[in-house]
Amino acid sequence: MSQKRAFITGITGQDGSYLAELLLSKDYEVHGLVRRVALEDPENRLSRLASIRSQLHFHSGSLESYASIHHVLGRIQPDECYHLAAQSFVTYSFDDEFTTLQANINGTHYLLSALKSIAPNCLFYFAGSSEMFGQADEVPQNERTRFHPRSTYGISKVAGFELTRNYREAYGLRACNGILFNHESPRRGFEFVTRKITSGVARILAGKSDEVRLGNLEARRDWGHAREYVAAMWLMLQQPEPDDYVIATGETHSVADVVEVAFDAAGLDWRKYVVCDRDLHRPSEVNVLSGDASKARRELGWEPRIHFRELILEMLAHDCQAQGVTLATGAWTDSKQ
Ligand code: GDR
C-alpha cells in the first residue's frame, strides 16, 4: 500500500507536534500548514518540532484565506486532514471576540469547503472542545450533552462542530469531531493555567520570581496528557464510519489542586506565593467540566493511562530542568521529552 499523506493545521502547537510524531512513527508523509513568519523564524516558532523538522513538509499559507487553503490542499491531496489550528486561549476570546469567531469559524469552513471540492475522500478531524459544554446540564458530559458555551471561543467551537457534522451529513464527507477535554504536557503554552503554575514554581525555585498570580482557583477541569489525546484523534479517523467522540479522563481537579501538587513537590508553601487576582477571573466562567469517554473506550479502544499528579509532576520536572534547578524531593517522574 502506498504511503498515506496527512495534513495538519496547527502543526507547530502542542497537539500538532505530538500528532506529527505519532503519524511519522506510523510511516505517514506528514504535511503542515504554517505561517510564513514561522518559516522565517524556525528556531522559535517551530521549536516543538525541532527533533522531527527535517522529516516534515511545511506549506506556507493562511486559514484566513479560502484561496490559500484551496491552493495548499490542491498541492498535497491529503488522505487525512487534522484541523487543530485555532485561537485557542479562552481568556483572549473575551478581549477579542471578533477575531476569535472569524478565525475559528471561517478557518474551519474554508477547509471543509476546499476539501469537498478537491479531496472529497479525505478523512477529516475537527478539534472540538469541552468548552462547547460550558455550563452543562449534566455531569459528566458525553456526546449527547447539550452545548451551552460561555465564551466566544466556545461558541466558535460549537460552530466548527456543527459545520463538520453538516459536511458529513449533507455532502458525505468522512468528517469526525473530537470533543477533547483539557490536555496538557511540557509543551503546553505558558498562558494556560497548568503550565503557568509549573513554570511559575520553577522560576521561584530559580530565584527569578516570588509569586504566581492566578484567577479562579475553584474552577474544576478534567486534565489529561496531550500525547495520549492525539492518539485518540488518529483512532477516530481509522473507524469504518465517521462519528463524534468525547475524549477525557473522567477525573476532575481544581486549579487549587494543581497549585498544591506543584508547590508541594517543590517543597514550597503555596500560600506564600500564590496571589489571587480578581482581574484574571473570566466574565463568564465554566465552573466544572468532567468528561465521560466511555464511547471512545468502547469503540476506539482508547483509554487514558497518565493521571493528574503524574502529568503535573512531568511538567514541573521539565520546567525545573529548563530553569537549571533540581527538585529536592525527587517526587516527580522524569520528563519523557
Ligand atoms: P481552558 O484552559 O480555558 O479550560 O481551555 P486554561 O488553562 O486557560 O484555564 C483552565 C481554568 O483555570 C482557570 N484559571 C486560569 N486560567 C488561566 N489561563 N490563567 C490563570 O491565571 C488562571 N487562574 C485560574 C480558568 O478560569 C479556567 O477555569 C483549554 C484550552 O486548551 C482550550 O483551547 C481547550 O478547548 C480547552 O482547554 C478544552
Image (spheres, rainbow, N blue to C red):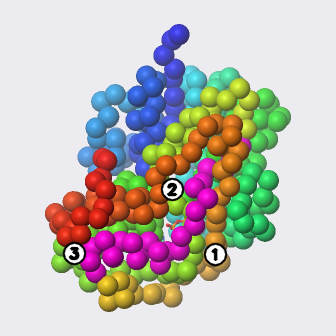
- From the image, tell me which residue sits under label 3: 205
Q: Assess mark 1: CB under 8 A from ligand 1?
A: yes
In the rendered structure, which amino acid carries the disc numbered 2? Gly
Q: Closer to the camera: disc 2 or disc 1?
A: 2
In magenta, the rendered stretch is 244-268
The number of numbered badges drawn on the structure is: 3
In the rendered structure, which amino acid carries the disc numbered 3? Leu
What residue is drawn where x is 28% and y is 38%? 51
Judging depth in this view, the residue of 84 and 110 nearest the camera is 84
Element under label 2?
A: strand
Q: Percent x, y for residue 76?
A: 52, 24
What residue is drawn where x is 76% and y is 48%? 162
Is 37 displayed left or right of 206 in the figure? right
Q: Percent x, y for residue 292?
A: 68, 55
Magenta span contains residue 260: yes
Question: Residues under labels 2 and 1: Cα distance?
Answer: 18 Å
* Residue 6 visible in image: yes
Element under label 1?
A: loop
* Residue 65 visible in image: no
- From the image, tell me which residue sits under label 2: 224
Vertical placement of residue 188 versus 229, above or below = below
In the rendered structure, which amino acid carries the disc numbered 1? Asn
Q: Percent x, y for residue 209?
A: 24, 79
- From the image, tell me which residue sits under label 1: 287
